[in-house]
């Protein structure tokens, strides 16, 4: 990233909200479930599957955790009613993990049961390292009971290879991603090349253990190496999928679909779009150009 981009990333919190909204609108489906379902329909027509994510951050009140679970139950009903190809991705801290693990497990169980009734699937996103153990405990417990749950592991975490072995229960389904939180060096690999290397070690371990692999990345090097690994191990098309975030590298998305791979787009929606958008903009290597263009367009 250029020095200018770095300066702009550092000053993003001071960029007016309406500018952030304009630049980041490509990363978010909209504020309502109707907006999100419309976009999922469009993605389905392009040959992609989706996973719907209700935007929001950690909650500290029980009522909010319960309301979030209610919304996901509603989402699962609408996915079925509208006949779109999408599952859901959920964040444990939005479902009360920091209040009480039992409350969170019950909330997620309610979503998993609703998914089961609708013939659907729930992916539990992975957050920062203070949540990893509890998230994996909840995942294992619910996957053993219901069989329609997946989890996420982060290639930057030093513990990930051990976690793959530990969470490989029957029908295990793991999304592998690089990881987005800032973690200390004793917990996380730091170098760009090192994280890539661990990503590939993790993917190979997942394949070796028969885990369904959700390969979440926009890093073309990793995509290239993943395709080679899948071919080398003869992984059938229905035992893996690529995953990408809405609004990021759409050309790569189209290429993978045209090559016959299954691909799922992560579709965030909701009123809490601001923190998510800031995270995506920080990762965008061309953030300065986009922000400046939006500012000029606003004159
Ligand atoms: C479907 C999905 C689900 C995820 N779930 C989680 C999760 O549960 N927990 C977690 O910690 N992390 C999650 N992540 C985020 C992930 O950990 C990475 O932070 C993110 O994917 C960037 O890593 P990358 O592999 O794309 O590689 P990078 O090296 O970051 O990016 C590769 C290339 O992609 C392009 N690119 C990346 N981001 C952008 C952007 N915003 N705008 C424009 N171009 C961009 C750039 O060209 C860049 O060079 C998820 C990612 C995806 C795709």
Image (cartoon, helix red, strand yellow):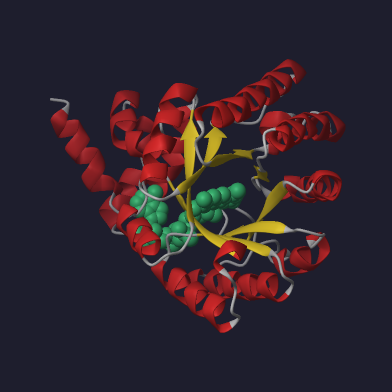
Horizontal relation, residue 286 to residue 158: left or right: left
Horizontal relation, residue 72 to residue 277: left or right: right
Q: Is residue 80 visible?
A: yes
Who's the residue at 14% across and 33% down the image? 296
Residue nearest the observer in this picture, 184 or 244: 244
Q: Position of residue 125 (x, y in %)?
A: 64, 45
Residue nearest the observer in this picture, 66 or 189: 66
Q: Is residue 278 above or below residue 248?
A: above
Q: Is residue 155 visible?
A: no
Residue nearest the observer in this picture, 142 or 164: 142
Residue nearest the observer in this picture, 191 or 224: 224
Q: Is residue 30 above or below residue 191?
A: above
**Quadrant into which the N terminus falls:** bottom left
Q: Position of residue 80 (x, y in %)?
A: 58, 31
**Quadrant into which the C terminus falls:** top left
Please count the marks in the image: 0
Who's the residue at 68% across and 21% down the image? 70
Q: Tell which residue pokes out farthest to the top in this image.
A: 63
Who's the residue at 65% across and 40% down the image? 120
Q: Position of residue 213 (x, y in %)?
A: 62, 63
Based on the displayed image, in which of its 4 quarters is residue 12 positioned? Answer: top left
Q: Position of residue 203 (x, y in %)?
A: 62, 70
């Amino acid at each position: 990233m250029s020095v200018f981009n770095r300066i702009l990333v550092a000053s993003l919190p001071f960029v007016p909200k309406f500018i952030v909204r304009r630049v980041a609108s490509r990363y978010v489906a909209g504020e309502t479930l109707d907006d999100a379902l419309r976009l999922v329909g469009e993605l389905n027509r392009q040959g992609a599957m989706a996973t719907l994510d209700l935007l929001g951050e950690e909650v500290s009140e029980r009522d909010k955790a319960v309301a979030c679970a209610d919304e996901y139950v509603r989402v699962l009903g609408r996915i079925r009613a509208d006949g779109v190809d999408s599952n859901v991705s959920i964040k444990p801290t939005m479902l009360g993990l920091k209040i009480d693990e039992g409350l969170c497990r019950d909330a997620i169980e309610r979503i998993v049961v609703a998914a089961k009734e609708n013939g659907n699937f729930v992916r539990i996103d992975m957050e920062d390292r203070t949540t990893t153990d509890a998230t994996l405990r909840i995942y294992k417990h619910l996957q053993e009971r219901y069989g329609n749950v997946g989890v996420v592991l982060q290639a930057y975490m030093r513990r990930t290879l051990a976690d793959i072995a530990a969470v490989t229960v029957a029908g295990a389904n793991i999304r592998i991603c690089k990881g987005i939180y800032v973690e200390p060096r004793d917990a996380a690999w730091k170098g760009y090349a090192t994280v890539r290397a661990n990503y590939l070690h993790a993917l190979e371990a997942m394949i070796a253990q028969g885990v369904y692999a959700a390969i979440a990345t926009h890093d073309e090097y990793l995509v290239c190496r993943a395709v080679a690994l899948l071919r080398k191990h003869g992984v059938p098309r229905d035992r893996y999928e690529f995953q990408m975030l809405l609004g990021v590298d759409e050309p790569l998305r189209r290429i993978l679909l045209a090559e016959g791979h299954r691909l799922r787009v992560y579709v965030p929606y909701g009123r809490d779009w601001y923190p998510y958008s800031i995270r995506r903009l920080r990762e965008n290597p061309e953030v300065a150009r986009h922000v400046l263009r939006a500012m000029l367009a606003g004159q």
